[in-house]
Image (cartoon, rainbow, N blue to C red):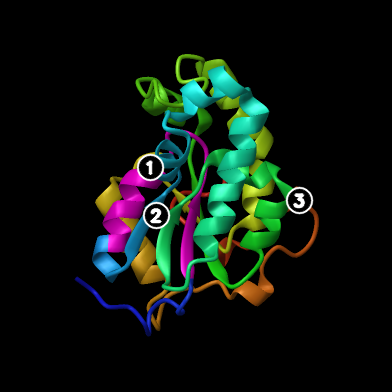
Amino acid sequence: MIHTERLMPDRHVVLIGAMGSGKTTIGRLLAARIGRRFMDNDETLMARARAAASAVADRDGIDELHRVEAEILVDHLATHLPAVIAAAASVVDDEDARRALSGPCLVIWLEGDPGVLARRAGGGSHRPFAGEPDEQKRLARARAASFALTADLVVDVTTSTPATIVAQIIDAFAPTGRSAPADDRRQGAASSPPATDHRIGTERRR
């Protein structure tokens, strides 16, 4: 276990990204590496709604699912001890969730090629649109600008393994790494990509 009080500021680390980006897998690994609690949207949703996301969407409608997912993120961020939080992809569509993410937390966008992410998410029947790769790709592209505006750090997850990605994140916040101060983020229009020194992995896909 690596205790990273000096490597990462003493605040929540939030992973955002499209379905298939590996938020849960990477979040668990990162939390274990830095000695923090892991908080996952899907697990909390199951506890609250007693159903997986796809069942909640079928039962209550997709808008209600997204409302609950945003509420879960806000509640996770309100906890006292810093944690690693895996947020639902939909949270960047919600004004209250975006406002909460603009507070004292580090937001990491797990970015990937939409086609690759849709293939990875194809077998996950617990999520809405799991069997609809075209809709998954559409949503990933539609939310890209909001992900970019919200993130402090962007990590390309298209080809790297979860263990490699976790190591890259930790390195980025090491004293000689390329940390992205929260006060400097989210400037300008939503269509503007993050600064290149806040990006890990391949060059931005056009």
Q: Which residue is mark 2?
A: 39
Q: Position of residue 160 (x, y in %)?
A: 33, 45
Q: Reading the chain from its start, which is encountered first: label 3 or label 1?
A: 1
| In the rendered image, the vertical position of residue 145 relative to residue 4, given as above or below | above
How many other residues sit within 10 Å of disc 2, few (<14), some (14-19) or many (≥20)?
A: many
Three-letter residue code for mark 2: Met
Residue range highlighted in magenta: 12-31
Q: Which residue is mark 1?
A: 43
Callouts 2 and 1 close, C-beta under 8 Å: yes
Give the residue drawn at x 42%, y 71%. Answer: 82
- The answer for how far apart the CA atoms under marks 3 and 1 are is 30 Å
Residue 13 part of the magenta-drawn span? yes
Q: Which mark is residue 190?
A: 3
Callouts 3 and 1 close, C-beta under 8 Å: no
Residue 25 part of the magenta-drawn span? yes
Whether residue 15 is visible here, answered yes or no, is yes
Snapshot quadrant of residue 161: top left
Nearer the observer: mark 3 or 1; the answer is 1
Snapshot quadrant of residue 174: bottom left
| In the rendered image, the vertical position of residue 127 relative to residue 78, given as above or below | above
Q: Position of residue 156 (x, y in %)?
A: 45, 48
- The answer for how far apart the CA atoms under marks 2 and 1 are is 8 Å
Give the residue drawn at x 19%, y 71%. Answer: 1
